[in-house]
Image (cartoon, coloured by chain):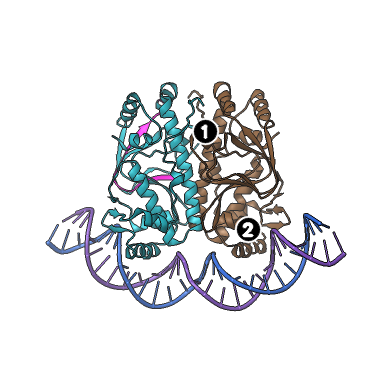
Chain colours: A brown, B cyan, C blue, D purple
Amino acid sequence: MSPLVRKLEQFVRLSSTDRAYLTRAASERLRKFGPRVDIVREGERPKDVQLVVAGWACRYKQLEDGRRQVVSIFLPGDSCDLNVFILREMDHSIGSITDVTVADLSREFFEEISAGYPRIVTALWWESLVDAAIQREWTLNLGQRTALERMAHLLCELFFRLRLAGLTNGESCDFPLTQADLADASGLSKVHVNRTLQELRSANLIVLKGKTLVVPDLRRLMDAGLFNSNYLHMEREGRQLDATE
Amino acid sequence: MSPLVRKLEQFVRLSSTDRAYLTRAASERLRKFGPRVDIVREGERPKDVQLVVAGWACRYKQLEDGRRQVVSIFLPGDSCDLNVFILREMDHSIGSITDVTVADLSREFFEEISAGYPRIVTALWWESLVDAAIQREWTLNLGQRTALERMAHLLCELFFRLRLAGLTNGESCDFPLTQADLADASGLSKVHVNRTLQELRSANLIVLKGKTLVVPDLRRLMDAGLFNSNYLHMEREGRQLDATE
DNA sequence: CAATTTCAATAACGTATGTTATTCACTCTC
DNA sequence: GAGAGTGAATAACATACGTTATTGAAATTG
């Protein structure tokens, strides 16, 4: 099952027709990118919504003098917002981290699901609201948490989201972010990211080597990061747009 | 003209029927709050979308030990997202800053506009995308900008948004945020906010006294905050969902 | 209109994090 | 399989910002 379907199914019960439709949409019109390249640049006007089918990518913004902030991380199954159908131009860039495969979802795709796949619509609504919640949590993370808490929180979030998409193996997962990436995402310097990771390591909160992250005791890492998963809204909805109450 | 209508009209040409409908929706089911009280609390499940008709409010999140981050500021005409119809519970709180009047928008309101007011739908879409863009910009602000840049940027954003809603008088506007509020919103300490404001004052970038802000030279304040307004997407759309291309 | 509380200003001092630089291990490439 | 480049580790040092505390003015309240 694809990461997208797996993720959405956590919230909305999809029919097999829904699943088949999503799976088809995510396998047509594919584009591949190497690592560390721009997929969309600030100022551009892409025609389609981009769904990350495989690999890691990120949204980032840059100041004129080069300072760079990663504002969100795309894991397989994540898509950029509906931006492209309404706004005139991108206010940020999207760049690949690893090799990435992107599926382009056209306006027609969204018109079709609006007309005939209400559960998919609800699921995508849910996804976009969770995206917004994540962005708020990042604001809290950068504004209030110390370096150690911040890093622990970021790692927790990624671990939870990977698990939701079916991309963890027990306590471990692929982890292609470099320390420079973590610095850009956390607002810390590279050197301090290094220090912070070592602190997490020596507290046995993480094992991070090569491109693999192991979290031996997720509960403890969550405590270290003051991590509360409620903002990920990982419960199947109690009521939905088309539910009768 | 109400701040909401005025704001939305910047992007979507509304018919007089649209305007009348919005104005009516924003004048029924009103609730009033005093300053510094919670309108909705984290964990609750409000039934309606809250539209701020008058006054200033904010979204905030709090850590267990009391550290508090304001993650967004609601000006008149702003509304919280559609959260309430899809997600199980609030992942943040909404609190008043001044006296606030809120209009409750029911699910029926959204069903009606979906059925009969496509331009309002587009306008609200636009609004929610701009909200997301603002949240990303705040992430950049907290992650990369220095205290001075950060404060200048925040003031610029508020000034632009107030102007869009028709709430400025030339170079000045009401400004009810205390230094403690600015601290919570910028991730700085109160003391450092004070220092930073004085720096902005002595550079003649702002006049801030009582509850009034004057920006004598917006261009210079923008430069100081590395402020680029593109993320506010303040241009009337070139194409919309129902446009033919 | 006194009593309280809130907000702003300022000072002295502490520290978490940034900066610059060097070295070492890997990996990729020709 | 030497050379080049990237990512990680470490050190020495610098600083932007936080903390705690005090004071005065202004707003709010009984």
Q: Which residues are magenta?
A: B91-108
Q: Tag 2, which secondary structure?
A: helix
Who's the residue at 68% across and 53% down the image?
A: A215
Residue B106 falls within the magenta-colored stretch: yes
Quadrant position of residue B10: top left
Q: Compare residues A148 and A44 and report the one nearer the observer.
A: A44
Q: Can you give x and y, in whole percent of width and height, for residue A163 in the image?
A: 66, 43
- The amino acid at mark 1 is Phe
Neighbours of disc 2 within 10 Å: few (<14), some (14-19), many (20+): some
The residue to which callout 1 is attached is: A85
To which chain does the residue with label 1 belong? A
Quadrant position of residue A112: top right
Vertical position of residue B228 compared to residue A201: above or below: above
To which chain does the residue with label 2 belong? A
Quarter of the figure with the N terminus of chain A: top right
- Number of numbered labels in the structure image: 2
Q: Can you give x and y, in whole percent of width and height, for residue B9 in the image?
A: 36, 34
Residue D12 located left or right of residue B171: right
Task: Tell me the distance, in whole angstroms, between the alpha carbons under discs 1 and 2.
Answer: 33 Å
Picture disc at residue A180: 2
